[in-house]
């Protein structure tokens, strides 16, 4: 019997703890796994030997239920890039010594693109040094940009929240009888999946957002202003959704003139201020009232409006990751394969991590236009937001669990 270790990394989601619950369940159900440990703050927790025993707290089924509906990363997160082993082997020696100390036979890393890089490097090191430990990637990201999988846990819940929020803001935008432009900035660096989800806000009575701009297509400021002016003249109040990562044709981010210019450890530029830039352009160039809204972290932590489909799949993919590792899989990431749109049906598989780590999946070009989203995308996304979980409330508010 071996123990297993699970950690969470990168930006949280409303479903990342549901995946953690799935891994915990998988560990509890297996006679081949003893203790289920959690690393505090991702791979940094492993490096610091900061592990907690999850068996005691989560042998209580009620605590597991609360974990599933709790947003953010229960174990804590990090954004740490491991060096190549041939550059610096020190962190690998530390990590695997911690694995050995706690008799870890299985390591599950819940994360996105950059986290899968960590899975890849750790698995390569284990193979190169004949270390018998199974290392599996378990996907999460609201960005939905991991390749080799139909979608990612966390995306459906974020999409549901975005569509509902944009629909509510579109109602609010129509209360005054004067021309106005509401510009809503949504997350998405190079892939516009989240922003495209705003298309679900449209109704027959209120077809907002009227324009959707994604990073998959070059952004042209003059075309944008022309789009907005014509639509304002036509209907008065215009709602626009934009990805934070939209870029001009030369590759410059629209927000670069207003953002800090700082980068993270993976050399990703900090993006902020896209909607504000466009708000100022509409005010100054068109003389029309404009307002910018940056939804920011609410997109990834709104567990009160999570998708039941998303949560159910998140638990399942975590639990199946344990089953796959017990069967001998390593250096792979769990994935979804869609079998049918209607009725919606998927199956869970696993794919080689080298086909996933450090790669991004963008929206197919035939699903979008320069300033809108087409029906194939709507067919794809609708099943992912379906269902409402039975959220546990106390004193009128959702209950969350803390470490």
Image (cartoon, rainbow, N blue to C red):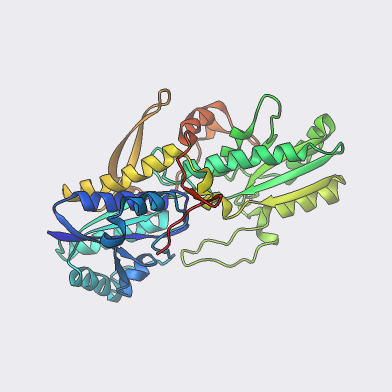
> Where residue 18 sits: x, y (%)?
38, 49
Looking at the image, the residue that sits furthest to the front is 395
> Where residue 169 sits: x, y (%)?
70, 41
Between 237 and 377, the one lying in front of the other is 237
Identify the residue shown where x is 60% and y is 39%: 164
Identify the residue shown where x is 73% and y is 54%: 277
- Left or right? Give the position of 261 relative to 180: left
Look at the picture and state if 162 lies above or below 60: above
> Where residue 197 sits: x, y (%)?
56, 38
- Left or right? Give the position of 195 relative to 82: right
- The quadrant in which residue 192 appears is top right
- Left or right? Give the position of 175 relative to 323: right
Quarter of the figure with the C terminus: bottom left
How many dots with numbers? Answer: 0
> Where residue 287 sits: x, y (%)?
87, 46
Residue 354 visible in the displayed image: no
Residue 18 visible in the displayed image: yes
Between 292 and 285, the one lying in front of the other is 292
Look at the picture and state if 160 lies above or below 138: above
Quarter of the figure with the N terminus: bottom left
Between 285 and 139, the one lying in front of the other is 139
């Amino acid at each position: 019997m071996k123990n297993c270790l699970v950690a969470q990394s990168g930006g949280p989601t409303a479903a990342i703890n549901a995946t953690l619950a799935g891994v915990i369940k998988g560990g509890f159900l297996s006679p081949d796994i003893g203790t289920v440990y959690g690393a505090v703050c991702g791979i940094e927790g492993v490096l610091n030997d900061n592990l907690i025993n999850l068996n005691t707290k989560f042998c209580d089924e009620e605590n597991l239920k609360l974990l599933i509906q709790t947003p953010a990363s229960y174990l804590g997160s990090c954004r740490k890039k491991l060096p190549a082993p041939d550059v610096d082997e020190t962190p690998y020696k530390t990590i695997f010594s911690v694995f050995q100390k706690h008799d870890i036979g299985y390591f599950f890393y819940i994360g996105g693109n950059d986290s899968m890089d960590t899975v890849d490097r750790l698995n390569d090191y284990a193979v190169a040094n004949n270390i018998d430990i199974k290392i599996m990637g378990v996907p999460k990201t609201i960005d939905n940009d991991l390749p080799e999988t139909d979608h990612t846990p966390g995306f459906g819940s974020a999409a549901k929240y975005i569509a509902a929020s944009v629909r509510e803001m579109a109602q609010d935008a129509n209360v005054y009888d004067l021309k106005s432009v509401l510009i809503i900035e949504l997350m998405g660096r190079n892939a516009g999946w989240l922003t495209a989800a705003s298309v679900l806000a449209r109704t027959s009575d209120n077809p907002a957002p009227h324009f959707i701009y994604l990073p998959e297509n070059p952004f042209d400021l003059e075309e944008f202003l022309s789009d907005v002016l014509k639509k304002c003249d036509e209907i008065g109040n215009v709602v626009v959704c934009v990805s934070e990562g939209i870029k001009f044709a030369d590759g410059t981010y629209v927000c670069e003139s207003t953002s800090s210019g700082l980068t993270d450890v993976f050399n990703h530029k900090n993006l902020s201020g896209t909607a504000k830039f466009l708000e100022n352009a509409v005010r100054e160039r068109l003389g029309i009232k404009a307002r910018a809204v940056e939804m920011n972290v609410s997109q990834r932590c709104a567990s009160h409006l999570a998708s039941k489909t998303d949560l159910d799949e998140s638990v399942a993919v975590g639990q199946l990751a344990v089953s796959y590792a017990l069967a001998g899989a390593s250096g792979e990431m769990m994935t979804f394969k869609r079998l049918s749109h209607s009725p919606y049906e998927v199956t869970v598989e696993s794919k080689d991590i080298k086909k996933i780590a450090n790669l991004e999946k963008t929206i197919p070009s035939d699903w979008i236009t320069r300033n809108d989203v087409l029906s194939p995308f709507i067919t794809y996304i609708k099943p992912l937001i379906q269902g409402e979980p039975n959220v546990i409330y106390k004193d009128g508010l959702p209950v969350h669990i803390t470490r």
